[in-house]
Image: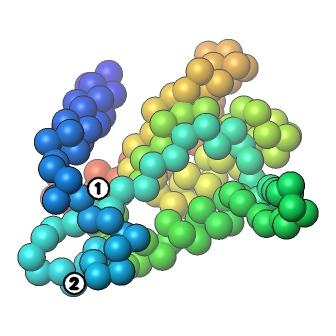
Amino acid sequence: MKSELFIYIFLFLIISTFCLLTEEDIIDLKDEAKAPPSPDDKDIYYIPILHTNDIHGSFYPKKVLLPNNESYTIGGLEYLGKYASIMKEEWGNRFLYFDAGDQFQGGIEGYISEGKIMMDFYNELKVEKSVLGNHEFDYGIPYLKKYMEQKKFDNRSRRNPGR
């Protein structure tokens, strides 16, 4: 209970901080004159945050067909995992990854694996924190407890080995 309260307070503080920023404080990555943030920047201490929600167990990428018959591929855990790995390698412990629920229910892959595919994904990436969405309750509380027992990604010991 205390950890959930901490997460909500933490997210509130992050959102509040963004509300205090002025237009000059925000880096527009479309502006080529401004370089994107770098871990080597000595003037500002960046903390990159990756946030996902409503993945619904969608393991595979999806093909999108545009009205002009162009197609491209979006999503998929392979792409997301690779992106998160690159960010962790580049930013180290400053990189944070949060998930806001609806993790495993919805996609056929999540259904067939009963959510295990998503828990394996989150355990491998060592997600900082995640919260439950409404679909985590679809199979009932006993199932949810079993699912949560598989969690191995609480990173407090990785970030603060002395605690």
Left or right placement of residue 49 versus residue 101 in this view: left
Tag shown at residue 90: none
Query: In terms of depth relative to the viewer, which is nearer, 32 or 78?
Result: 32
Q: Residue at x 86, y 55 (%)?
A: 67
Q: Few, some or many C-alpha atoms within 10 Å of disc 1 (few <14, some 14-19, many ≥20)?
A: few
Please give the residue where the numbered disc 1 appears in the rendered image: 157
The amino acid at mark 2 is Asp
SS category of the residue bearing label 1? helix
The amino acid at mark 1 is Ser
Q: Quadrant of residue 72?
A: bottom right
Residue 38 % position (x, y)? 28, 79
Query: In terms of depth relative to the viewer, which is nearer, 66 or 38?
Result: 66
Alpha carbon separation for disc pair 1 and 2: 25 Å
Res. 116 in view: no
Furthest toward the left, the residue is 43
- Could you tell which of marks 1 and 2 lies nearer the N-terminus? 2
Tag shown at residue 40: 2
